[in-house]
Image (cartoon, rainbow, N blue to C red):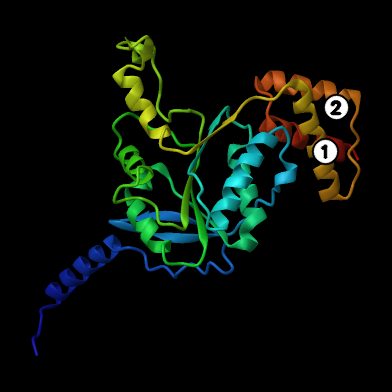
Amino acid sequence: MINLKPEVVAQIERVLSSVEMLLPKVAKAVDWKTCYAANWRRRSFSGYLEPVRVTDTIRLDQLLGVDEQKAIMVNNTRQFLNGYPANNALLWGSRGTGKSSIVKALLNEFASEGLRVIQVEKEDLVYIAEIFAAVEDLPYRFIMLCDDLTFEFGELSYKMLKSALDGSVYSAPENVLIYVTSNRRYLLPEYSSDHIGGKYVKGELQQSEVQDEKSSLSDRFGLWVAFHVFTQDRYLQAVQLCFQQWSDKLGKPIPWSEDAERAAIKWSHDKTKRCGRTAFQFSKNWVGKYLLKG
């Protein structure tokens, strides 16, 4: 038996403590029977799936003004759940118009049929192969969601996602689809100089090499689903729907009036945006004040 000096023992303990901090967190396996969503959490040299309690109860019929977008995403997701061919999807467009909400609503709609969601931050796309390996043998269908995604040119995570969509060694297993939301159609910043270098080939204008490279990632998504700002009528319909939802939730009637309509229009002007998010934010402000007055 080796007798170590106390100072040596103390040093070994410090080393072991330091090493322990570098090791991945010991996490229980996600119980996908009861857990419908998870986040990928980075830790040291790897990561793990952290279960998420789904608290957003939004349903597809509560999303107003995006009927065409809903139909596209519902059909694609149903194809996926039934084991039929389905496409990875890029949901792009103006902020606050319902891109993320549609994905949440899809989960609420189809969780009982085996749909699950894994949310992955941009910086963690370098672990995409590990994420796929963690779920590829499970009897569920997974949407890997990258929300509000944008890149700078040349980022490693950009290259990893591009490889996964391209069907390379990082390609997704059969039970995983990739849904991405972004304000940018090409996921990269666009500059006027990008157009320099375009040329005509057999009478047709071809993109410059910079444009071609910038569009190469978004081109790999089978579906492009565009979201745009609302018309004023559609925005006011969304506000009224929010009023009705608050009324149902609180058990108190929230009247719609000319004053409410004028205030809603002014609110959208102040926000410089007519969209579902603006409608919801206005409804919280108006309904809260209405209830406070008693």
- Which residue is label 2 attached to? 260
- Which residue is label 1 attached to? 243
| Residue 283 image offset from top left, x and y in percent | 77, 35
Sequence-wise, the earlier of marks 2 and 1 is: 1
Q: Residues within 10 Å of mark 1 (few under 14, many from 20)?
A: many
**Above or below — where is 56 with respect to 161?**
below
Q: Residue at x 14, y 77 (%)?
A: 6
Q: Is residue 20 left or right of residue 31?
A: left
Label 2: which secondary element: helix
Please tell me in which quadrant of the rendered image residue 129 appears.
bottom left
User: What is the number of callouts on the image?
Assistant: 2
Q: Residue at x 43, y 54 (%)?
A: 40
Q: Is residue 88 left or right of residue 200?
A: right
Q: Is residue 213 left or right of residue 101?
A: left
**Real-space Cα separation, disc 2 to disc 1, in angstroms:** 10 Å
Which residue is situated farthest in the bottom direction here? 1
**Above or below — where is 279 with respect to 178?**
above
Q: In the image, what residue type sits under mark 1? A: Phe
Q: Residue at x 39, y 16 (%)?
A: 191
| Residue 242 image offset from top left, x and y in percent | 78, 38
- Which image quadrant: the C terminus? top right
| Residue 22 image offset from top left, x and y in percent | 27, 60
Q: Work out whether residue 245 or residue 67 is closer to the camera in this orientation and state it.
A: 67
Label 1: which secondary element: helix
**Pointers 2 and 1 in contact (CB under 8 A)?**
yes
**Above or below — where is 8 with respect to 231?**
below
Q: In the image, what residue type sits under mark 2? A: Ala
| Residue 81 image offset from top left, x and y in percent | 57, 57
**Above or below — where is 23 with respect to 261?**
below
- Which image quadrant: the N terminus? bottom left
Q: Work out whether residue 90 or residue 71 is closer to the camera in this orientation and state it.
A: 71
